[in-house]
Structure formats: C-alpha cells, structure tokens
Amino acid sequence: MTDLNKTEAAASADQKKTVEENFALLDEIVRSLEDPSVSLEECFRLYQEGMNILKDVHGTIDTYEKKIQILRENGETEDFR
C-alpha cells in the first residue's frame, strides 16, 4: 500500500460510514480475498480490515436496536429485545 493509500484509508476511517457503505466495503474485501493473485500479507491485512468493519457494523446495529421501542396496546413502551 502506498503512502497515499494509507493516508486516504486513515482519512476515510475517521468518517463514520453507513451500514450500507460498510457492507459494500466488505463485499469488495471478500472479492479481493477470493483473488488468487493477492499476496498472503495483503490477505491478512484485508481480513483485519474486514473484521474491524464488522465490529463497527455490529456496534451500529446494536445501537439502533436499543433505540427501537415497541408501543404496547395500553400505551406503555418497552425496549426492543
């Protein structure tokens, strides 16, 4: 990875991506991992990047789930589980 790519990667990591954007990145990573011409070192880097993205997606989804509430018939609310 060139210094320019590292800088771009660091800048984009600072910006919070949507779940959809993260899934698109994961799709790209999977395609790269399936490419037999990709070096073992690059595969390890891509795997680590993918796991970090998955962690972020899981945290985002967990946050959304905690915010969802179900309105009961009697007007009371309860947390979504």
Image: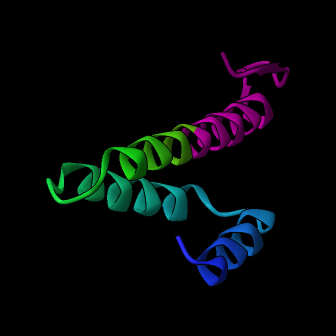
**Residue 45: image location, x then y, percent:** 49, 47
- Asked where in the image residue 75 lies, by quadrant, the reply is top right
Q: Residue 35 colored magenta?
A: no
- The residue drawn where x is 41% and y is 63% is 24
- The residue drawn where x is 73% and y is 34% is 68
Q: Residue 61 colored magenta?
A: yes
Q: Is 2 positioned to the left or the right of 46 in the image?
A: right
**Nearest the eye: 75 or 62:** 62
Q: Is 38 positioned to the left or the right of 12 in the image?
A: left
- What is the tally of numbered marks visible in this picture? 0
* Quadrant location of the C terminus in the rendered image: top right
Q: Is 48 positioned to the left or the right of 70 in the image?
A: left
Residue that extends furthest to the bottom in the rendered view of this protein: 4
- The residue drawn where x is 53% and y is 37% is 51
**Residue 36: image location, x then y, percent:** 14, 53
Give, as a single range, the part of the protein colored magenta. 52-81
* Colour convention: rainbow
Q: Is residue 4 above or below residue 66?
A: below
Q: In this view, does 1 lie above or below 66?
A: below
- Asked where in the image residue 8 lies, by quadrant, the reply is bottom right
**Residue 73: image location, x then y, percent:** 71, 21
- Asked where in the image residue 78 lies, by quadrant, the reply is top right
Residue that extends furthest to the right in the rendered view of this protein: 76
Q: In this view, does 7 lie above or below 54?
A: below
**Residue 71: image location, x then y, percent:** 74, 28
